[in-house]
Image (cartoon, rainbow, N blue to C red):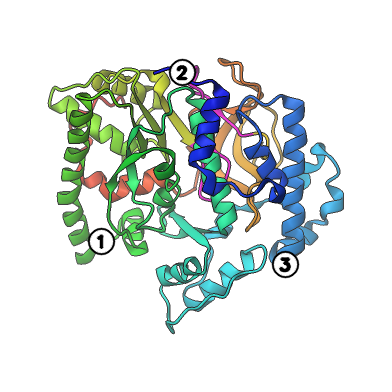
Amino acid sequence: METLSLEAYLKEFDFRLQKYIPPPSDWTPAEQAIFQVPDPYRVELDSAKTMQFAAIRYAFQRHFEHNSMYRNFCLEYGISPPDICGPEDLEKIPLISDHFFKEHPPGRDFAAWIANIFTGELPRITIRQTQPSFEEVIQAFNAAGLVIAYSSGTSGRQTVIPRDRRTYNISEYAAARSAIAMSYPQWQYNMSGYLLMPNPFKTNVYAGKVCQVYFDAIEKVNVAIDRQIPAHIVRMAMSNEKGFQPTLIRFINRLSNIRMIDRIIHWLEMHEKTDRRIIMVGAPFLAWAVMNRLQKQGRRFDFGQRAGIVTGGGWKIYEGQRLPAAEFRRLAQETLGIQPEYCLDVYGMVEGNGWMVHCPEGHYLHLPYTYYKGMVLDNNYKPLSYGEWGRFAFLDGAALSYPGFIITGDMVRMLEHCPVCDRPGPVLEPEIRRASGEDMRGCGEEVRRMVSADIGGPNEQSGLST
């Protein structure tokens, strides 16, 4: 098949994702910075700096004017929109800890909490229950047109982010565009895919919800976890709850998840006999479980250049064991025949709409610097220079329905530009870890905890270096 030019490649992508793109006359500065640029990782630095400032300043003014909670927070710091005059002032914008988004009360008070952190005018929300559950509150907001999703840490407390449909569409488009631009020219609409996450149409867990765009970006998608996953199941998994019900749930999951790995291997067997391109997207743990099973069986595939893996959400395999991304790529080459440049990881989070994607050349995580500003902070939450380890924070111009100016619990090192490829923007070094005292969290960690008891064990042959 003839290779499309980058322009034609992205034009085809935009055609497939038309429903995510609002009319150009309505674009905010962040949308201009996302929808107008050909390749989000190859924008000339001066132009990108101008776009980034416009996007983030617009978002800051929007939240200051239409979110009383955030406005009062800013006034405590003595900061308002007139103080943000140029790119050098962006670091003055008050940052919210990611802990804030999990400190919500139960029942109807939870609904009031969502309303208070939401920016803009809410649609009419109808909650019929007197004592609604966590999931019932979220379902009521989503029934009114919002897209509220949650993620959890090991404490079992869910991080909740209230996206309106516009913010959700921006985030979905940006995620897909970032991945397919970085993997040019591998993407084709008529590929076959396997989603190694929960079905996005059957869950409010962000691990699944964020992958809805996958079903629009390619023609045929199979789903690994194709069942309803209510909040209490995620909570049990993340907090390791004991008792009869959690034990029964884990036993039932074990039976179904062993079959899940068999289904994925059968799918690989089927496509080994075709010339169709394939791509697996989702939790590294599930891809590893497939490769681990193949190793135990003494089997391998050789998909070569017609297959790829895009992972996201964390690299923990078992308690106390972490799989380095480079080791994952080696296993993919040995068991599936997939070349390392076609194994890319995406770093993102439920609180943000910026997607950092591995470059194929060096596997550094490139920031989408036209609308999203990453920062590294010291122990006093002051910005550090490039090349120093610290806590990751970001200013997100694409977050229109909640203030996306957030300090995370991740420890990173940011470089001014990639030391391997020629893309001009900043990068994060590939290995990211949680800060001391922070919950283990992330999409991949949720999936791992839901199914890890079912697939192998730390003492079995795995090809894992520890």
Q: Is residue 91 visible?
A: yes
Check disc 3 and report the residue beneath it.
68
Does label 3 or label 1 sit earlier along the sequence? 3
Check disc 1 and report the residue beneath it.
242
Kindly report which numbered mark, 1 or 2, lies closer to the viewer in this rendering: 2
- Residue range of the region highlighted in magenta in the rendering: 347-368
- The foreground one among 352 and 320 is 352
The verdict on residue 457 being magenta is no
| Magenta stretch: dominant secondary structure | loop
On screen, 126 above or below 24? below
Does label 1 or label 2 sit earlier along the sequence? 2
Q: Amino acid at mark 3?
A: Ser
Residue 55 coordinates in the image, percent (x, y): 72, 44
What distance separates the C-alpha of mark 1 from that of mark 2? 54 Å
Circle 1: element type: loop
On screen, 409 above or below 126? above
Q: Is residue 377 visible?
A: no
Neighbourhood count class around disc 3 (C-alpha, 10 Å): few under 14, some 14–19, many 20 upward: some
- What mark, if any, has residue 3 been given in the picture? 2
Does label 3 or label 2 sit earlier along the sequence? 2
Tell me if 388 is positioned left or right of 78 in this view: left
| Quadrant showing the C terminus | top left
Q: Quadrant of residue 165?
A: bottom right
- The foreground one among 190 and 434 is 190
Q: Amino acid at mark 1?
A: Lys
Circle 3: element type: helix
